Amino acid sequence: QVQLVESGGGLVQAGASLRLSCAASGRTFVGYTMGWFRQAPGKEREFVSAVMGSSGGRTYYADSVKGRFTISRDNAQNTVYLQMNSLKPEDTAVYYCAVRARPVSVDDSRGYDYWGPGTQVTVSS
């Protein structure tokens, strides 16, 4: 059974950093694009970042996080990370990791088949 579990969320002040992790189990996702999405209260889920499946794979970022967030993956550990620096109150959301299984744009959540339950990130001003 495929399972994704996020961790690393929490409550921080503006300007702080957090590192989210997403551990996959049940199968390997080497070669698959893995992404991070987030959903704030009352808002739709939005794309944050993605990393292609190959070693040293290409990365993608939403404009709102570019320069502050860094995505990486460890294929040996079947884990993807999201390093979040210079956090802002508007980054407050539940963060989800997901595995892209369909050939659609990397920022389109409809292309992702497997999702974790999410981890809460709250940034106070």
Image (cartoon, rainbow, N blue to C red):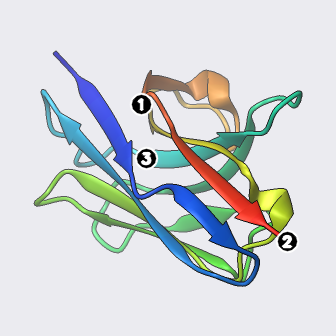
Q: How far is the residue under mark 1 from the one under mark 2? A: 28 Å
Label drawn at residue 33: 3
Type of the residue with mark 2: Ser
Q: Which of the image's four quarters has the C terminus?
A: bottom right
Q: How far is the residue under mark 3 from the one under mark 1? A: 15 Å
Type of the residue with mark 3: Thr
Depth order, front residue of 111/67: 67
Type of the residue with mark 1: Gly
Q: Are marks 1 and 2 in contact (CB under 8 Å)?
A: no
Element under label 1?
loop
At x 51%, y 71%, the residue is 18
At x 76%, y 77%, the residue is 14
At x 78%, y 39%, the residue is 40
At x 63%, y 69%, the residue is 12
Label 1 sits on residue? 116
Quadrant of the rendered structure where residue 73 is? bottom left
Depth order, front residue of 7/50: 7
Label drawn at residue 124: none
Label 2 sits on residue? 125
Judged left or right of residue 101, residue 87 is right
Element under label 2?
loop
Depth order, front residue of 73/111: 73
Image location (x, y in percent) of residue 53: 35, 54
